[in-house]
Amino acid sequence: MEKTVLVAMSGGVDSSVCAHLLMEAGYDCQGCTMRLYRNGKGELCRSKVCCTLRDMDDAARVCSLLEIPFSAADLTGLFREKVVDKFVGVYESGGTPNPCIDCNRHLKFDAFLQEADRKGLWYMATGHYARVGYDRDLGRWVLRKAVDESKDQSYVLYMLTQEQLSRTLLPLGERRKEEIRELAQALGFPNAQKPDSQDICFVPDGDYAAFLEEYTGKTYPPGDFLDREGQVVGRHQGAVRYTVGQRRGLGLPMGERIYVVGKDMERNTVTVGPESALYSTVVWADEVNWIVPPTGPFRARAKTRYRMTEQPCAVYPQGEKVRVEFDAPQRAVTPGQALVLYDGDLVLGGGTILNENE
């Protein structure tokens, strides 16, 4: 059982090569695709996700080439509850969610690991670009950034527990993306040149406001744009349609570049101001998961969004929350996104960014 692994097969090139590398390393592999949608009347994203049927077919074809078993785990209900419903709730409360993190937390590294248990398999594996290992000095399983930092996905894996880390294999963490595509081509995989997914899977056209209205059946009403003094300066098309840091699409002739700097969902107002108003030094986060538990305040580097370079900061753990004071002000820190802490390439932990007054 120690060399058995359930590979999360998305139909993409990364998870396909992941399975091949594990087989080369002597693991007994099975492939499994998570079914997240149903394409019927009244079902989630019924007009947007037909491509997932192709993804499942691509995964099955690769498993056939590798001569390993293939199955599909129906996680549609859990996906709706833990990912999509939360996505809607965070937007309606004024935040900007990161559904990939919730999918990893509740599905890929929780429900999928339970699927491995049901099949009598010890490990699970994904095509994420990150590294997992046991640190003898720390006496803990740890998560590290990928060798290919341009593809590193450790930011969306900060929530992994010791149990999950101890049973997770991430063979792509030691490789570069170009190697993976070249290997897939050499192996004759049908998805060798398949583009990487860039959008939220259930909002593939990027129009999340239209998705919210279709999914909830609600119409989000117009309201007032306010300046920083609380004066009405225009009308917006519904507060859920705007995110902190947004400049385009405001339609406010105010004589200077202005940005969304805040929202009040109860009053349905959107506050705008100059770019200077977007910068903050202190950030709070809750739902914190510590991969390396702290013993007190410490120095680290932190990211507040996926595509940014970690910035130096002081970290003050406070129960289930954490307060971070950056050395330099950070632009457009957004409630609902993840705050992830690093020591070099080591992921220390992370949490969900709160509104400043929380």
Image (tube, rainbow, N blue to C red):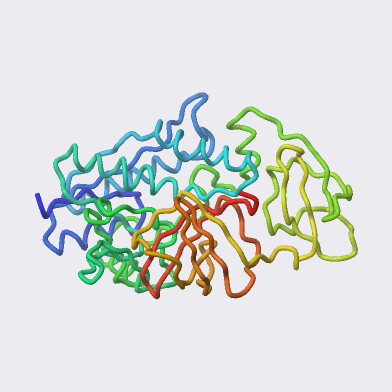
User: Residue 115, how many percent across, how many down?
Assistant: 24, 39
Q: Residue at x 24, y 65 (%)?
A: 133
Q: Is residue 211 left or right of residue 20?
A: right
Q: Quadrant of residue 37?
A: top left
Give the residue drawn at x 84%, y 54%: 227
Along the line of sight, which residue is nearer the eye, 42 or 242? 242
Residue 79: x, y in percent? 42, 37
Q: Who's the residue at 30% across and 55% down the image?
A: 126
Q: Residue at x 58, y 42 (%)?
A: 90
Quadrant assignment, res 20 = bottom left
Q: From the viewer's perspective, is residue 208 above or below residue 142?
A: above
Residue projecting furthest to the front? 296
Is 254 on the left-hand or right-hand side of 275? right
Q: Is residue 30 above or below residue 308?
A: above
Q: Is residue 165 left or right of residue 38?
A: left
Q: Residue furthest left?
A: 1
Q: Is residue 141 above or below residue 47?
A: below
Depth order, front residue of 63/175:
175
